[in-house]
Amino acid sequence: MPIARARTDLPMIDQKEPAAVALGYVAEATKADTAKYPSFVIGQQCSSCQLFRGEALASSGLCGLYPGKRAAASGWCSAWTKKS
C-alpha cells in the first residue's frame, strides 16, 4: 500500500477534542497516561502504528481514526497497533 502524504493544510489533532480524549491521544508519546493506559510501552508512537499514514521521517501524518486531521509522528493513542 502506498504511503499517503500528510496534507499540511489539515489541522493537527487537538488533544482536547472528544475523540482524542476518548483514546488518550497525546502529541508526544512520552506523555501518555501510563496509569490509565498500562498497555503503553516506551517506543510506541504514531509513526510505528499500523493506522498512521505518513512519509518516513515526516513530523506528522494521517490517521484513519481522526479524519481530516494530522497526527504527530511522535504521538500516541490507545488504538496503537504495531505496523506489520
Image (cartoon, rainbow, N blue to C red):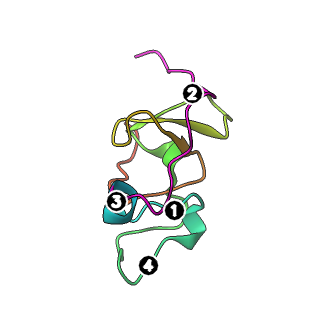
- Left or right of 13 on screen, residue 58: right
Q: What residue type is disc 4 on?
A: Thr
| Foreground disc of the pair 1, 3 | 3
Q: What residue type is disc 2 on?
A: Ala
**What is the x, y in percent for residue 28?**
60, 61
Question: In the figure, 57 relative to 72: above or below?
Answer: above
Q: Residue at x 50, y 21 (%)?
A: 4
Res 55 label: none
Rendered image quadrant of residue 78: bottom left
Q: What residue type is disc 3 on?
A: Pro
Residue furthest out toward the top: 2
Determine if the magenta segment contains residue 5.
Answer: yes
Q: Please name the residue that numbered disc 2 is placed on.
A: 6
Q: Quadrant of the N terminus?
A: top left
Q: Residue at x 56, y 44 (%)?
A: 12
Q: Which residues are magenta?
A: 1-18
Q: Which numbered disc flags the more N-terminal residue, 2 or 3?
A: 2
Q: What residue type is disc 1 on?
A: Val
Res 26 label: 1
Q: Please name the residue that numbered disc 3 is placed on.
A: 18
Q: Please name the residue that numbered disc 4 is placed on.
A: 34
Question: In 3D space, how far apart are the residues under numbered discs 4 and 3 (Cα atoms)?
Answer: 19 Å
- Left or right of 51 on screen, residue 70: right
Q: Which numbered disc flags the more N-terminal residue, 4 or 3?
A: 3
